[in-house]
Amino acid sequence: MSAAAAAPADAGAAVPVKRDRKKLIIIAAAVLLLLVIGAGATVFLLKKKAAAADETTTGASAGHQSAKPDLKHPPTFLPLDPFVVNLADKDADRYAQIGITFEVEDPKFAEQMKAFMPAIRNGILMILAHKSSAELLERAGKEQLSAEILRESARTMGIEMAEPIVAKKAAGDQAAADDNDEPKLVKKEAKAPVEPNPIRHVHFSNFIVQ
């Protein structure tokens, strides 16, 4: 009787072990499911990011292509003889050798410019003679020079343009600026051009400062 009575007790003790195994299997399956979902979400996000990058690249390529020049209607270039001019440096004798090429609207206007070339060259020489080597060695100085040459050449041909914005020290604030080492700058307001300028760009083909 005692042996028969003990058998059911042993069978009942094995039940919790089976339940624990089931719990472990369920937990393992849940963890696996979470891993699968996480991997799927990661792949989805990576694909979405790659698609967005492709769209950006495509858009940039399209923008770059739209900026290309029209090869069927190339611009007209008018090169000038090189300029050699003494600069406005006070501490040393400095000079600049600069090659300039105009990009203009069409060949007809290029021929018209040639008739004004003595006056145009004179205006450019006057601009260069007031420049210092420090100004011309900086990129901003070269860009400013290009804008001044563009405007002066157009004015020589009777085309009014907006004056380039030049930052200059205010005369009344000069003393205060020197004391504070923070020069105050005044910008000239640019006026809208009266008419379109057939001179589109001023290109430097040579730029030597010595």
Image (tube, rainbow, N blue to C red):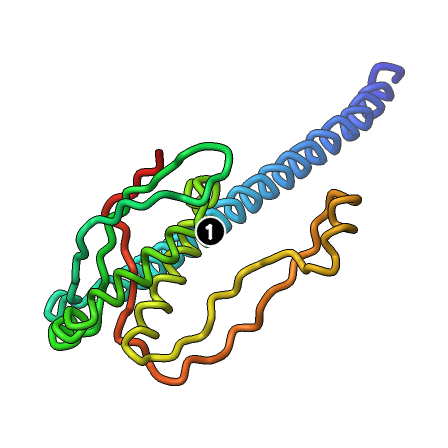
| 189 and 6: which is toward the camera | 189
| 91 and 13: which is toward the camera | 91
Picture residue at 56% right of the left edge, 46% below the top = 37
Indicate the secondary structure of the residue bearing disc 1: helix
**Quadrant where the C terminus lies?**
top left
In this rendering, would 78 be left or right of 203?
Answer: left
Q: Position of residue 161 (x, y in %)?
A: 40, 76
Near mark 1 (Cα within 10 A), the count class, few <14, some 14-19 or many ≥20, is few
Picture residue at 76% right of the left edge, 50% below the top = 175
Q: Which quadrant would residue 133 be assigned to in this image?
A: top left
**Quadrant where the N terminus lies?**
top right
Q: Residue furthest top?
A: 3
Q: How many marks?
A: 1
Picture residue at 12% right of the left edge, 72% below the top = 111
In this rendering, would 46 be left or right of 10?
Answer: left
Q: Which quadrant would residue 187 be assigned to in this image?
A: bottom right
Q: Residue furthest bottom?
A: 194
* Tag 1: amino acid: Lys
Say above or below: 175 vs 30.
below
Say above or below: 4 vs 169.
above
Picture residue at 46% right of the left edge, 51% below the top = 49
Q: Position of residue 116 (x, y in %)?
A: 20, 71
In this rendering, would 73 be left or right of 30?
Answer: left
In this rendering, would 98 be left or right of 14?
Answer: left
Q: Position of residue 34 (x, y in %)?
A: 61, 43
| 54 and 179: which is toward the camera | 179
Instruction: Determine which residue is flagged by label 1.
Output: 49
| 31 and 61: which is toward the camera | 61
Q: Position of residue 158 (x, y in %)?
A: 31, 80
